Image: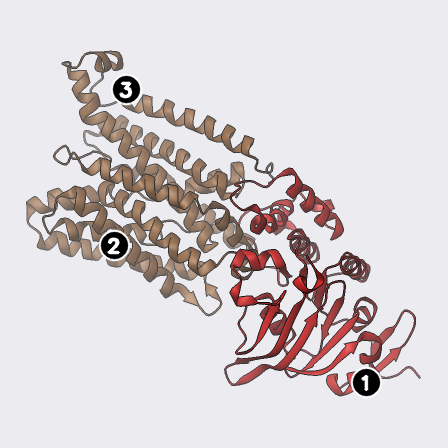
Chain colours: A red, B brown
Amino acid sequence: MTPEATTLAAQGLAHHYGQRAALADVSLTLEPGTVTAIVGPNGAGKSTLLRVLAGLQTASAGAVRVGGQPLESLSPSERARRIAFAGGEPALPFAWTATELVLMARAPHLGRRLFETAADLALARAALADAGAEAFADRPVYELSAGERQRVFIARALCQDTPVLLLDEPTSHQDPAQAVALGALIRRLAAAGRAVACVLHDLTLAARVADRVLILAAGRVAGAGPSVGILNADLLKSVYGAHVTVYPGPPPVIAFGPAAP
Amino acid sequence: MSHPLLTARRLWTVLGVLALATLAVAVAALGFGAVPIDLGRALTDASSTDHAILWGHRVPRVLAGLTTGAVLAASGAALQGLLRNALADPFILGVSGGAALGGALVGLTGLAAFVAAPVGGFVGAALALFAVTALAARRDGISPLHILLVGVVVNAFAGSMLMVLQALAGPAAVQRVLLRLMGSLAVDPTEPLALPVVVAASALGLALVMRHARALDLLALGDDGARTVGVDPEALRRRLFWVLSLPIGAVVAATGLIGFVGLIVPHGVRLALGPDHRLLLPASALAGSVFVLLADLAVRWLTGPLGTELPVGVVTTAIGGPLFLWLLRRDARSSA
């Protein structure tokens, strides 16, 4: 597919929960080969934005297009062949193993076939390895820790093999080493041509992983641009209402709290 | 507990073995009953009493058992997948109660049973299924324990309405329409078309459900997770509620309330073979047939010592009830 065919573009998105505006006039473009981090304080609308981009929620205004086509014009399985989403791991009924769960991502590619092929299984195994989940590939998912389960669900999104990948707080249950490993994986996915967007709370990780950063505050875009320029102390301080120190690095470190004496 | 990945080869091997087991139990059920018969003579000598018993009583009864077990177990498995709830089952959710009430109501209008039972059962099952899920729905989905409580209420309501019908209807109508709801595989010889209609409705319903086996798997990811891999969970639930109401309605209106088959058979199959619906649905259907035929063999075996024939639902409930309680306790512990 050409880069234009895989670009995800959102224009003028707005969304309300009752009276409260969760999103207002948000626009962004996810280009192939780039990582976009979506950051901002709790309740800023980050997850709502990602869910609207994934087609899980319909915005009350604005449009999402993938490859120039409106999201709502695509069939559910056509959409699933273009956009994968990971975020929030539901408790699983029954004893599905990690490999079985990841193989479910091949469903939109099966067509009329009843069973996955050896190639599908190879993709699932590779996705589990990429996400650092191969050690428990054959264990029931309900037995796994929160961090392990999160990596299995990330592997599921990878196995969907889509040009656009949306990750909602992919490192929320990860230890620092795993978070860095996932950051490196996200860079590799972009290098392979995917358009990746992830909601991140860890701004240091965002600065290291993302090409572009979108800062949301109260549902509005407070800043957007290349990560180097946009993640500056003044803007972050005004958005988060806390003292922020940016150590430019490399590698950059963004620390919250009073400056060291 | 873990299980091998499902492949086409594993699917057909397991189903082949289960089909042979079903066949063996069906042959045993054909040969065993209150009157001993010689299967060889029954098949070769059309003028023998053995032939009359085999074709007039045993074959219809075994067919009813096969169909009932297959429908209850496979639809239990499908409901459990649809509702993401291991404790869902047509009997517990009140769907069977709705089907029984619907079948009885239409039956009392005087329509021939082969029309009245499946039509009334289908409408009753569908109404109960949509009512129970609507009443149990919360903003964040259907609460697993709440739906069981709503099912209890719907069952109690259907039961009390059946008693009202029993009080109002004449003795002949009670005999004809209501006694069959006690749960028995004995087929009414005055209604030769009843069984073929039930078998056809069941086969059609189960075939349609099995077409959605992989979509049922994907519901394990939650409603949002299912959407991200191309399944519309609300549309799937709506469609399968209608589809499942057809075989459940037909079977329950014909053979009555046979409890817990839809609960314990899929549970056992899932423990042994894994949760993949591509195998779980057909394997549950076959295992359900075996379970109901064995329960009916137990009924016939007990008829001698007891001097009367117990409803087959008594046997399935006597086995299934305690197992259900055990499951409930185990689930409460693991989610605590």
Q: Nearer the viewer, mark 2 or mark 3?
A: 2
Q: Residue tagged by mark 3?
A: B31
Question: Relative to residue A177, is residue A72 drawn left or right?
Answer: left
Residue at (67, 46) in percent of width and height = A124
Q: Position of residue A121 (x, y in %)?
A: 65, 42
Find residue B123 and name its label. 2
Residue closest to the eye, B234 or B336? B234
Q: Secondary structure at mark 3?
A: helix
Q: Secondary structure at mark 1?
A: loop
The Cα–Cα distance between marks 1 and 2, rounded to whole angstroms, is 65 Å
Q: Residue tagged by mark 1?
A: A243
Question: Three-letter amino acid code at disc 3?
Answer: Gly
Q: Is residue A154 visible?
A: yes
The Cα–Cα distance between marks 2 and 3, rounded to whole angstroms, is 36 Å
Instruction: Determine if marks 2 and 3 fall on one subunit.
Output: yes
Subunit bearing disc 1: A
Question: Three-letter amino acid code at disc 2?
Answer: Val
Mark 2 or mark 3: whose residue is earlier in sequence: 3
Question: Relative to residue B198, is residue B326 drawn left or right?
Answer: right
Q: Looking at the rendering, in which quadrant would you find the N terminus of chain A?
A: bottom right
Residue at (31, 52) in percent of width and height = B95
Question: Relative to residue B60, is residue A53 drawn left or right?
Answer: right
**Mark 2: few/some/many CA within 10 Å (<14, 14-19, 20+):** many
Q: Nearer the viewer, mark 1 or mark 2?
A: 2
Instruction: Determine if marks 1 and 2 fall on one subunit.
Output: no
**Mark 1: few/some/many CA within 10 Å (<14, 14-19, 20+):** some
Task: Name the quadrant containing residue A205.
Answer: bottom right
The Cα–Cα distance between marks 1 and 3, rounded to whole angstroms, is 85 Å
Q: Looking at the rendering, in which quadrant would you find the C terminus of chain A?
A: bottom right
Instruction: Determine if marks 1 and 3 fall on one subunit.
Output: no
Residue at (61, 51) in percent of width and height = A105
Q: Position of residue A222 (x, y in %)?
A: 71, 84
